[in-house]
Image (spheres, rainbow, N blue to C red):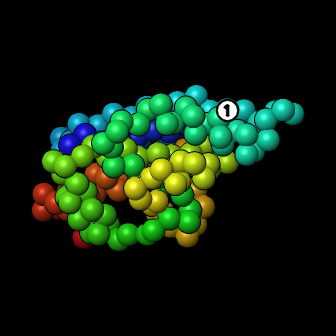
Amino acid sequence: MKIKIFALGKSKQKFIEEGLQEYLKRLTRYVQIDFKILPDVKLTKTNSIEIVKEKEAIILEKQLAEFDFVIALDENGTQYSSKDFAKLIEMKKGKSNLAFIIGGVYGLSPKILNKANLILSFSKFTFTHQMIRFILTEQLYRAFTILEGKKYHY
């Protein structure tokens, strides 16, 4: 299994980037991981929010492989406990690659949400699209430590 994470737009916050890099490094002990930052689309006089989301959907769709199990991160998605998230990952081991999609400033288009095999939410709170990168990688690391019986999750 390989985990792919696709995120739109560069992070400008050093503390988030440092945390993200730390958890990406930790994850390599357990799984092959590919984290890609894709260009976001800017809001302009000719680009409404909906147009921005549709253009970003085209960029994201080009990254997805036919047999990826696509997990879109969205505030209206299904919430899991850390242990249940670990079970989900365990069920997918050896069957397909996991492709996590993190939207840009305005979220994901309905086109991407409809294409997803699972829509995932980490909380009823709203997080910045940069912050969720860090949260996702920490939760992935936590899931693998749960599956390995390591002393990280209590």
Residue 89 visible here? yes
Residue 88 image-quadrant placement? bottom left
Residue 139 against residue 27 in the figure, above or below: below
Q: At 46% from the left edge and 59% from the top edge, which residue is drawn?
A: 119
Check the image and name the residue furthest to the front: 66
Q: Amino acid at mark 1?
A: Val
Residue at numbered disc 1: 41
Give SS at disc 1: loop
Residue 26 visible here? no
Front-lying residue, 114 or 91: 114
Q: Quadrant of the C terminus?
A: bottom left
Please state the horizontal and vertical placement of residue 146, each as a whole percent of the image: 20, 62
Residue 127 against residue 99 in the figure, above or below: below
Horizontal side of residue 9 vs 5, given as left or right: right
Front-lying residue, 61 or 142: 61
Q: At 31% from the left edge and 64% from the top edge, which residue is drawn?
A: 85
Check the image and name the residue furthest to the right: 45
Q: At 73% from the left edge and 45% from the top edge, which residue is drawn?
A: 50
Please state the horizontal and vertical placement of residue 67, each as a whole percent of the image: 30, 42
Please state the horizontal and vertical placement of residue 48, each as a whole percent of the image: 79, 41
Residue 63 image-quadrant placement? top left
Residue 74 against residue 105 in the figure, above or below: below
Horizontal side of residue 26 vs 39, given as left or right: left
Q: At 41% from the left edge and 59% from the top edge, which residue is drawn?
A: 118
Q: Quadrant of the N terminus?
A: top left
